[in-house]
Image: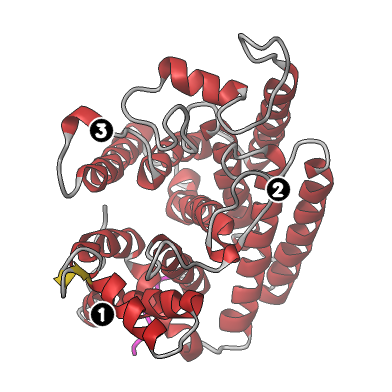
Amino acid sequence: MTLPSNRMLSLDMMRGFTVAAMILVNFPGSEEYVYFTLRHTHWNGLSFTDLVAPFFLFIVGVSISFAYTKKKQENAPKAKLYRKIITRSIKIFAVGMFLNLMPDFDWQHIRWTGTLHRIAIVFLVTAILFLNTNWKQQAWITAILLIGYCLVMTTIPLPGYGKVMLEPGLNIAAWLDTKYLPGRMWQGTWDPEGILSTFPSFATTITGMLAGKLIHSNYTQQEKAGYLMSAGLMAAAAGYFWGLGFPVNENLWTSSFVLVTSGFASLVLGAMIWWVDILQYKKYGAFGVILGANAIAVYVFGDLLSLIFYRLPFNGKPLNTAVVNQLISLSVPANLASLLYALLYVGIVFIPAWLLYRKNIIIKI
């Protein structure tokens, strides 16, 4: 394939593989048969699946740095930039609402939160923040968000219980969701993309903005990759030790979770820069680059195509169930059969992304 010269291919590659992982874990062949690490952890802990959402928000932060650094340096009119940021946020949020409503469009049990909804809100806040702060201020804001969130979650007693609690549905974040979050919640009485946990997710994206600042520096490519990986190791280690007191938890998006996952994301980005930009192994990451060029569109493709590949009846059963059962009947282990179908589905979603890439079409939402 012909790789465009005006994009950061290592970032596109990381974005693309992150979206592929998102589709892989969202659409197993069977919800009954899934390897542990391809499920979200029930509560405290970290699985491969738990890395997907923070990786994407980290990449959003790097992308913000790439999109607005030059405009910021040129003192471009902020009013025009604000309009574009707000418009894009509304579009992403609207697409998220469409996917939440699909396929039944049940307005009585609507859910107002989700992956794209959080991306929209976080992009809106952090992009405006980027235009009005420097990297040192952003670093301080990240520290304040993480420490402040930790203090709120670990010092404020849960109303009605008189003590601090960090259990599923029994914590101050869940209490706020119950009181103030409209619509249906993912877990009935609380939501992993709820109100309070959105604040530390801002910090996740700001860490991406700080990584973007490093990439825009005058360091050599080798130095950039080295600093990103070193910073990633230190952040992940700091998050681990913080997690001994404030556990690593995706549902609560804890401060320790932010540091561990942003650390891993920085490590991966540094490795991608080394692989693509330094060693020039571009062709081996073509799959990720193609998906990453239209990341949100690919995510939407995944949801839309699932109506066929996860709902279409085949001998009285959904297609995915029929295929997985057939593989199991051929002595394929159940979890592996489910994974094989998920991988097949990622390949199917790749087809429209590849067609768009061949036509040099970038769908901007």
Q: Going 69% across and 38% down the picture, which residue do you hit?
A: 255
Q: Main secondary structure of the magenta part?
A: loop
Estimate the spatial distance between the alpha carbons at disc 2 and disc 3, rounded to whole Å.
Answer: 32 Å
Residue in front for this viewpoint, 67 or 61: 61
Crowd class of label 3 (few under 14; some 14 to 19; many from 20; radius 10 Å):
some
Q: Going 75% across and 70% down the picture, which residue do you hit?
A: 226
Crowd class of label 2 (few under 14; some 14 to 19; many from 20; radius 10 Å):
many
**SS category of the residue bearing label 3:** loop
Specify whether 92 is left or right of 205: left
Q: Amino acid at mark 3?
A: Ile
Q: Residue 21 colored magenta?
A: no
Of tags 2 and 3, which is closer to the observer? Answer: 3
Residue 110: mark in rendering: 3
Along the polypeptide, which appears first: circle 3 or circle 1?
3
Residue 351: mark in rendering: 1
Residue 259: mark in rendering: 2
Of tags 3 and 1, which is closer to the observer? Answer: 3
Q: Position of residue 189 (x, y in %)?
A: 45, 27
In the image, residue 311 sits, relative to residue 42, either above or below, namely below
Estimate the spatial distance between the alpha carbons at disc 3 and disc 1, rounded to whole Å.
Answer: 31 Å
Along the polypeptide, which appears first: circle 2 or circle 3?
3
Q: Amino acid at mark 2?
A: Leu
